[in-house]
């Protein structure tokens, strides 16, 4: 039975959700590329609503994905009640070692080729990702790979905005409804800079430390041996505290950074794309 939304959702949102479920049901079987983020979690929930056991979550655990988010994804899949396939990757793709501007294209082409192989081998008719209607606003070369491989993007196709997704996610009790966007760790490193697994892990440790301090949206951008911290514009005021700044600098230097700086503009999506 389809989910009936409650008081927080308008009639238009209910109709939109019902149309999404109908669209997903027409696929008969589906593999959802699942990161555990806001969009893919909502898509997986709707896929379960539409297809039941014929919906599967596929998660790639690569060096440039947040390790704690992969663990969270496993808990969330159990909560939604579908099967999850976790494909572990230990190496950085050779084409991505110097972080080219088209890294998202290279990564998604490889990742979704792998998912398509799984879908074909196990008899699933479609593969989908969580791209939504708002994603067109940023530089996203990975969308080209999705188009080339004919990957479905149901949320984009059905016109779901991030606000729509958060509203319905809250209504149905998904814990991701208020989750900030995180993106892969390569987005913390300038284009053309060599990528090492050591750098990826220290970036993740630094961000996790800031999250543990209570910051909700953070990025630690790597510039050589410099860590450039971005926090949400609403949270910048918290950093007007010399004692706290000293603690942060000392802790993050302990992860292997020589210098720790603060971006005065605060967090904004795709800040390293500003130079393109």
Image (cartoon, grey):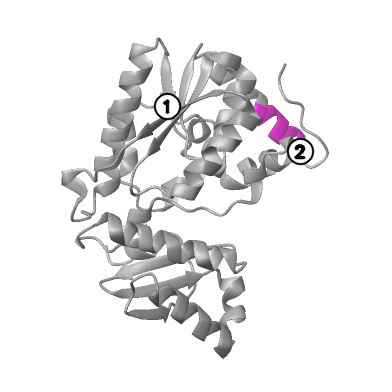
Left or right: 252 with respect to 186?
right
Residue 152's label in the rendered image is 1
Magenta-span inclusion, residue 12: yes
Q: Residue at x 57, y 83 (%)?
A: 244
Residue 179 point in image, percent of width and height:
60, 51
Left or right: 145 with respect to 67?
left
Q: Residue at x 20, y 53 (%)?
A: 100
Q: Residue furthest bottom?
A: 242
- Position of the N terminus, as image quadrant, is top right
Q: Is residue 239 visible?
A: yes
Q: Residue furthest front?
A: 254
- Position of the C terminus, as image quadrant, is bottom left
**Cβ atoms under marks 2 and 1 closer than 8 Å:** no
Q: Is residue 173 above or below residue 27?
A: below
Q: Residue at x 18, y 56 (%)?
A: 98
Which region of the structure is painted magenta?
9-17
Q: Quadrant of residue 221?
A: bottom left
Residue 129 point in image, percent of width and height:
44, 33
Q: Residue at x 61, y 72 (%)?
A: 234
* Residue named by callout 2: 10
Q: Is residue 27 above or below residue 266?
A: above
Residue 144 point in image, percent of width and height:
29, 38
Residue 228 point in image, percent of width and height:
39, 74
């Amino acid at each position: 039975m389809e989910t009936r939304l409650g008081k927080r959702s308008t009639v238009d949102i209910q109709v939109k959700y019902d149309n999404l479920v109908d669209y997903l049901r027409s696929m008969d079987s589906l593999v959802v590329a699942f990161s555990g983020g806001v969009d893919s979690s909502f898509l997986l929930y709707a896929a379960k609503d539409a297809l039941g056991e014929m919906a599967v979550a596929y998660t790639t655990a690569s060096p440039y994905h947040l390790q704690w988010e992969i663990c969270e994804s496993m808990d969330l899949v159990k909560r939604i009640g579908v099967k999850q396939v976790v494909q572990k990757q230990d190496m950085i793709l050779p084409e991505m070692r110097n972080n080219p501007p088209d890294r998202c294209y290279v990564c998604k082409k490889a990742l979704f080729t792998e998912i398509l192989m799984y879908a074909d081998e196990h008899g699933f008719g479609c593969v989908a990702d969580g791209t939504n209607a708002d994603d067109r606003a940023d530089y996203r070369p990975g969308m080209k790979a999705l188009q080339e491989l004919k990957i479905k993007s149901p949320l984009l196709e059905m016109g779901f905005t991030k606000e729509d997704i958060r509203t319905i996610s809250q209504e149905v009790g998904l814990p991701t409804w208020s989750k900030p966007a995180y993106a892969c760790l390569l987005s913390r490193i300038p284009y053309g800079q060599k990528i090492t697994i050591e750098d990826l892990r220290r970036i993740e440790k630094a961000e996790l430390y800031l999250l543990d301090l209570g910051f909700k949206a953070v990025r630690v951008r790597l510039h050589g041996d410099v860590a450039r911290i971005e926090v949400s514009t609403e949270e910048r005021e918290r950093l007007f505290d010399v004692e706290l700044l000293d603690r942060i600098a000392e802790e993050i230097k302990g992860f292997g950074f020589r210098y720790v700086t603060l971006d005065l503009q605060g967090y904004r999506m795709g800040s390293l794309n500003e130079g393109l």
